[in-house]
Amino acid sequence: MSLVSVLVPVFNAESYLLDSLQSILKQTFDDFELILVDDASTDNSSSVLKSIFDSRIRFIQHTENKGIGEALNSGLALAKGKYVLRMDADDIAYPNRIARQVEFMERYPQIGISGTLAEYFDGTPFNKIVKNECLRPSLLLDCPFAHPTVIIRKEILDKSRLRFSGYLEDYELWIKLSALTDFALLPEVLLKYRRSENQFTAQNFEKRANEANKLRINFAEYWLKRSLNPIERSIVSSGMPEAIQPDLNQVGIFCKELLNSAAWSDKAATLEVVKKLFFRNFYRSPKKLRSKFQILKNDFLSIKEKLNLLKKSRFSGVS
């Protein structure tokens, strides 16, 4: 039984597939099985996959396109490793990627899922360092991991019968896992991420944005242990038009309730995330709706932060 199951969904990736898989097969760590799931590609991806001979490879062929979530679930059904490590069919893993991630997870058994930093092929950072204690509460704002960098303890998935689901299969799974285990981010660049205007993310931006807002609302309701009203839903949602932007007084009240909740043990991390939510709403609100009182009354903001917001609003000073 291999220690790691490397899970790679494949759909029409023939141009980059061989280089991507070689970056896994040539890892410094070799105790893994490589599970390749061809999700009914219409190009030559299947031929490329079948041309690679390595005893560590396990191959699944879908006869119809089922989407990335179901492709991942097909791979999980076969996975035998202690860890499941994700990889996309057009990215490149650094040679020591698996070794570093396994070493990290073995050292910290309380961590159920962790990711790494990634960079685009031109060297531009894809994501940035986030403190470990901020990762779970930051689900309120965005997905905290670059999906093809994660490693997960399979035992957690199996015990809770969790699988990938939904349109944003990774974001939704991280939210479910947030109630079960600790998160971590290894602050090392271990993956080159390929930017493509034709990829799934770029082609379905509006649908993904709407789904992300639904997940933020679900996460806030889990955090507060209650349903959100329409105003609160707009506070946690991204991309809201000015016409329906709540005023800062409503935003402040909601942020204080989040802070007073016992959902997360690290209060400093919770405060950091809640401040970001307040700032997000501040910067998208019309200046005419801002008042000095609405800014100054929020005692979770520092004096410096309040003064900075006053300067950025229509006020030239404090009176």
Image (tube, grey):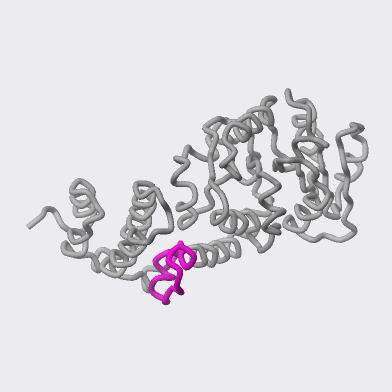
> Can residue 290 be found in the magenta stretch?
no
- Expressed as whole percent of the image width and height from the top left, the position of residue 270 reads 38, 52
The image quadrant that residue 291 belongs to is: bottom left
* Residue sitting nearer the eye, 179 or 199: 179
Nearer to me, 121 or 78: 78
> x%, y% of residue 157?
68, 53
Residue lying farthest to the top in this orientation: 28
State which region is magenta.
Answer: 220-240
The part of the image, by quadrant, that contains residue 13 is top right
Where's the N terminus, which quadrant?
top right
Q: Is residue 108 left or right of residue 229?
A: right
Q: Quadrant of the C terminus?
A: bottom left
Taking 108 as reference, is 73 above or below it?
Answer: below
**Image location (x, y in percent) of residue 272:** 36, 49
**Measuring 82% from the left and 43% from the top, which residue is drawn there?**
35
Q: Which residue occupies 90% across, 34% down?
A: 52
Position of 161 with respect to 121 (left or right) is right
Res. 234 image quadrant: bottom left
Q: Is residue 234 magenta?
A: yes
Rendering coords of residue 301 (x, y %): 24, 52
Q: Residue at x 86, y 61 (%)?
A: 64
| Along the line of sight, the residue nearer the viewer: 233 or 244 | 233
Measuring 46% from the left and 64% from the top, which residue is drawn there? 220
Q: 148 and 107: which one is in front?
A: 107
